[in-house]
Amino acid sequence: MRNGVIVFIAAFIALGVSWCGFVLAPVMQLGTEKQAAVLNSSDVYPIGRPGEANQGLQVYRANGCAACHTEQVQQSGFACDVMITSAGTNPPAVIAAWWRMQTNFFPNEMTQRFYSVIPNSGGVPQFPFERVRKEIADIAVESFQNVGAKAEIHIIAIGPDIERGWGLRRSVAEDFLYDQPVQLGSLRAGPDLANVGARLPDANWQLVHLYAPQALVKNSTMPPFRFLFEVRKIGNAPSPDALQFSKAFAPPAGCEVVPKPEAKQLAAYLSSLRADAPLYEAPFTPIMTKP
């Protein structure tokens, strides 16, 4: 009997400690999270989702979308792009410094993924070094400044998810501040959706994709969510909400496909997924358009 009490107390303590470590501690840590400041801006992040998008989160949850999609972009590290913003008054010296650095200091560093030159500069590259280590970028900026040019360092997040175009940085706690419940997911039968609203901002695209995934993504394995739509005969005039399809996916002649409120809410939620703000704990320099 005495041993039984000891075993019970030991088991109770073990379970209590586990609960505190895996449940209570995360709630205390993340439950006090607040909006974070966006780097180099007076803006704060995130901003609460609009009402229809909040309702869409519950539709997303009810239909088990998290069973096939994640909402967590992973990152393996970061690299730097060196950008020359001004060639100064001696462009040939800038070009000479660039070639000298490649030849003498770091010939194996990746350069010129997107070759472009500064207009009216005599051929000075706008991005002389890309995806390089921070110490290399510091040397390059100092070298260009020594010959009268102006240069700056852009921070670039790197990793397989970033290369796939799923996000610009890793996911952090602030991204989920207004989500209840958080739908992180654990399986990627489909692409990660943490930043899908920035990749595919057209809500109509999302609706067509929900009704007939293969109409937009060839060989898609995603099941159609046609129960979120109504196929009905066209009245005196087509509905302004009616979706447009190619011939292979169009409804029967004289009919139209109209999204139900749940479909609109789900599309609004997907369009609201935008983890694209640079933060102190997940920095990056917004991407510039390169030729």
Image (spheres, rainbow, N blue to C red):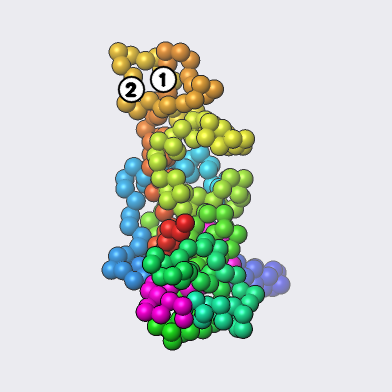
Give the class, few, some or many, for how many residues have Cα within 10 Å of label 1's Cα (few <14, many ≥20). many
Q: Which mark is residue 239?
A: 2
Earlier in the chain: of badge 1 and badge 2, it is 2
Q: Quadrant of residue 275?
A: bottom left
Residue 205 at x, y percent in the picture: 44, 37
- Residue occupied by mark 1: 256
Which residue is nearer to you in this view: 115 or 140?
Answer: 115
**Near-viewer residue (101 or 172):** 101
- Regarding residue 243, the answer to whether it shows in the image is yes
Q: Nearer the viewer, residue 120 or 98?
A: 120
Residue at 44%, 20% in the rendered image: 231
Percent of width and height locating residue 39? 36, 70
Q: Is residue 58 left or right of residue 159?
A: left
Mark 2, Cα crowd under 10 Å, few <14 / some 14-19 / many 20+, is few
**Disc 1 residue type (three-letter):** Glu
Q: Which segment did they paint magenta?
A: 73-93
Element carrying mark 2? loop
Number of the label disc, if any, that sits on residue 89: none
At a point 57% along the width and 58% down the height, the residue shown is 163
- What whole-number distance in Å separates the C-alpha atoms at marks 1 and 2? 8 Å
| Residue 81 colored in magenta in the image | yes
Determine if the magenta segment contains residue 153: no
Q: Is residue 258 above or below residue 171?
A: above
Figure quadrant of residue 113:
bottom right
Q: Residue at x 30, y 65 (%)?
A: 43
Amino acid type, mark 2: Ser
Marks 1/2 in contact by CB < 8 Å: the verdict is: yes
**What quarter of the picture does the N terminus occupy?**
bottom right
